[in-house]
Image (cartoon, rainbow, N blue to C red):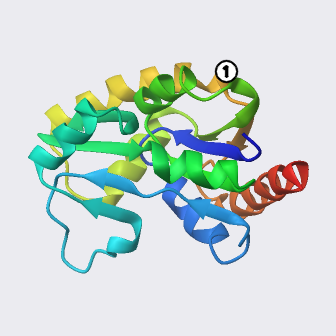
Amino acid sequence: MKGKFVLVVGTSGSGKNTLIEHVRPLVTEVVYAKSCVTRAPREGEDSGYRYFVSREDFETRVKNGEFLEWAEYGGNLYGTLRAEVENPMRDGKIVLKELEVQGVRQIRGKIPKEDLVIVFINAGSWEDVEARIKARAPITEGELAKRKERYDDEMSYMKEADIVIENPQGQVERAKKDFEKALRLVVEAVR
């Protein structure tokens, strides 16, 4: 392949989406891979980021090997279609995707290492991340415990990342600049 696949990984509440939304209008050479999901669209949700499909359609695509990765969360299926990544990469494009660590682990066996760039967004300690999660929306103690377990697993993946962007509480503007700079370096390397 001629392009690169940039995977953005980090804990819940690390600011992955904030950083991606920041670079969208600034780094126009990047293609954003849509997710395929079985959940219903949320009110006001932009379908430009996702394909909303039936569970039956999703499962058929799994059987046909159309996904680079997929997982089930909260009773819904989420995945990344091969065509969303491989076709633009063949054309020399940079493809960007936010993923959970579980998805990155699946992709690492399917895309050559030299074609991948793993960017880890580090939001700091569990206490900092917990405060961000609680500030976003109400959450039960049981769900918070599950998030803590996932946080520990996700943080263990940071050492495998090619690039780590520090995004501690109160430093989002610096993190935006660092993320943009890292993405521009990837773009330059592919040219």
Front in this rendered view, residue 154 or 127: 154
> Considering only vertical position in the picture, is 45 above or below 116?
below
Residue 115, image x and y in percent?
72, 35
Residue under label 1, please give it. Answer: 159
Residue 39, image x and y in percent?
16, 55
Front in this rendered view, residue 180 or 169: 180
Residue 54, image x and y in percent?
12, 54
How many labels sit on residues? 1
**In this picture, residue 140 sits left or right of residue 46:** left
The image quadrant of residue 49 is: bottom left
Q: Residue at x 76, y 61 (%)?
A: 180
Residue 33, image x and y in percent?
50, 56
Quarter of the picture containing the N terminus is top right
Can the viewer see residue 144? no
**In this picture, residue 35 sits left or right of residue 175:** left
Q: Residue at x 25, y 52 (%)?
A: 37
Can the viewer see residue 159? yes
